[in-house]
Image (spheres, grey):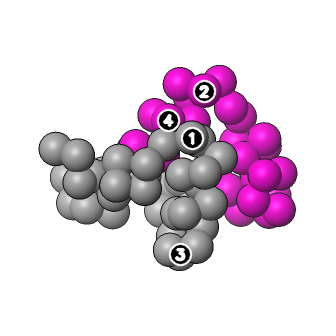
């Protein structure tokens, strides 16, 4: 699994662990549910600012999302 896939997997795992829907995450990021789905599925590039925002929303460390806690 490459780094980008690992980041996306950790985002999904963190989101589902919190019980958050894609629609909720989209609202928090001020994007549509469809746009959020594209982020999680890899159809849209994940920008650093978005990654930082996701860490805040999901209440996890950025280093966890980036996979540096291994």
Decide which of tag 3 and tag 2 comes sooner along the chain.
2
- Could you tell me which residue is drawn at 35 percent across and 47 percent down? 64
Residue 12, image x, y percentages: 50, 40
Decide which of tag 3 and tag 1 comes sooner along the chain.
3
- In the figure, is residue 22 to the left or right of 51? right
Q: Is residue 2 above or below residue 44?
A: above
**Quarter location, residue 39:** bottom right
Return the mark for residue 14. Answer: 4
Q: Is residue 52 above or below residue 16?
A: below
Residue pointed to by mark 1: 59
Q: Mark 4 to mark 1: distance in Å?
A: 9 Å
* Secondary element at tag 2: helix
- Could you tell me which residue is drawn at 46 percent across and 34 percent down? 13
Q: Which residues are magenta?
A: 10-38
Magenta segment main secondary structure? helix
Q: Mark 3 to mark 1: distance in Å?
A: 18 Å
Residue 24, image x, y percentages: 78, 41
Q: Mark 2 to mark 4: distance in Å?
A: 6 Å
* Secondary element at tag 1: loop
- 29 or 23: nearer the viewer: 29
Q: Is residue 41 above or below residue 44?
A: above
Residue pointed to by mark 3: 47
Residue pointed to by mark 2: 18
Using a 10 Å C-alpha cutoff, classify the residue at mark 1 as few (fewer than 14 neighbours), some (14 to 19) or many (20 or more): few
Using a 10 Å C-alpha cutoff, classify the residue at mark 3 as few (fewer than 14 neighbours), some (14 to 19) or many (20 or more): few
Residue 42, image x, y percentages: 48, 62
- 43 or 18: nearer the viewer: 18
Residue 19 lies in magenta, yes or no? yes
């Amino acid at each position: 699994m490459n780094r980008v896939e690992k980041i996306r997997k950790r985002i999904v795992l963190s989101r589902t662990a919190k019980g958050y829907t894609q629609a909720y995450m989209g609202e928090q990021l001020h994007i549509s549910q469809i746009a959020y789905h594209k982020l999680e599925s890899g159809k849209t590039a994940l920008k650093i600012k978005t990654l930082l925002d996701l860490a805040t929303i999901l209440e996890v460390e950025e280093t966890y999302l980036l996979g540096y806690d291994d």
